[in-house]
């Protein structure tokens, strides 16, 4: 067999090996399509999850009992998330690959603020003063991707 034939087989083997390695390291990660009760009862974190309607129930840094619901894609927050306190939606946040890109705080829906600032302001205010918001009505908020 000529050197050219050996080189051709070696290159083919390297290309195949590299392709397999790329598939297993990038897209082949194992993500859960469900949450355990332990994951639900922690501050919201999409690490290891790939699912819609992921839920979290936790006490935030300001002592508020928060319920959050949103979409996790490949271990990252991606899409619309809703944050409720005592059954009232207090914030809607849109994420793109773990980055907060748009937010609406129900205390001041005309101005965009970070989730942390919104929760801090909600804690300082009287939650009873927040108008209940229909959690299903997103027509004025964000388009789902």
Image (tube, rainbow, N blue to C red):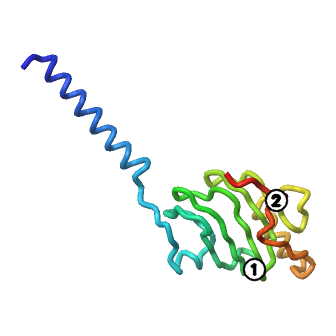
Give the residue drawn at x 24%, y 27%: 11
Q: Residue 49: x percent and y percent?
A: 51, 64
Vertically, is 108 above or below 144? below
Give the residue drawn at x 31%, y 43%: 20
- Mark 2 = which residue? 139
Q: Residue 8: x percent and y percent?
A: 20, 23
Q: Secondary structure at mark 2?
A: loop
Q: Relative to 9, is 53 on the left or the right?
A: right
Vertically, is 38 above or below 46? below
Vertically, is 11 above or below 122? above
Q: Which dot marks residue 32?
A: none
Where on the picture, by quarter, is residue 17? top left
**Sequence order check, earlier mark of 1 and 2:** 1
Q: Residue at the far left: name it.
A: 1
Where on the picture, by quarter, is residue 61? bottom right
Of badges 1 and 2, the one in the foreground is 2
- Mark 1 = which residue? 64
Vertically, is 102 above or below 70? above
Number of residue marks? 2
**Cβ–Cβ below 8 Å for labels 1 and 2?**
no
Mark 1 to mark 2: distance in Å? 27 Å
Q: Residue 62: x percent and y percent?
A: 76, 76
* 127 vs 2, nearest the viewer: 2
Q: Relative to 25, is 48 on the left or the right?
A: right
Give the residue drawn at x 60%, y 69%: 54
Give the residue drawn at x 42%, y 55%: 29
Quarter of the N terminus within the rendering? top left
């Amino acid at each position: 067999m000529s050197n050219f034939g050996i080189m051709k087989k070696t290159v083919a083997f390297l290309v195949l090996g590299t392709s397999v390695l790329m598939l297993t390291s990038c897209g082949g990660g194992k993500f859960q399509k469900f949450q355990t009760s332990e994951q639900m009862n922690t501050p919201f974190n999409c690490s290891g999850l790939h699912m819609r309607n992921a839920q979290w129930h936790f006490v935030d840094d300001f002592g508020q009992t928060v319920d959050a619901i949103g979409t996790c894609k490949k271990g990252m927050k991606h899409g619309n998330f809703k944050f409720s306190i005592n059954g009232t939606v207090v914030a809607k946040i849109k994420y793109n690959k773990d980055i907060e890109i748009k937010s609406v705080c129900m205390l001041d829906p005309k101005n965009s603020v970070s989730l942390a600032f919104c929760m801090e302001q909600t804690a300082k205010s009287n939650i009873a003063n927040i108008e209940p918001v229909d959690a299903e009505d997103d027509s004025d908020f964000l388009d789902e991707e």
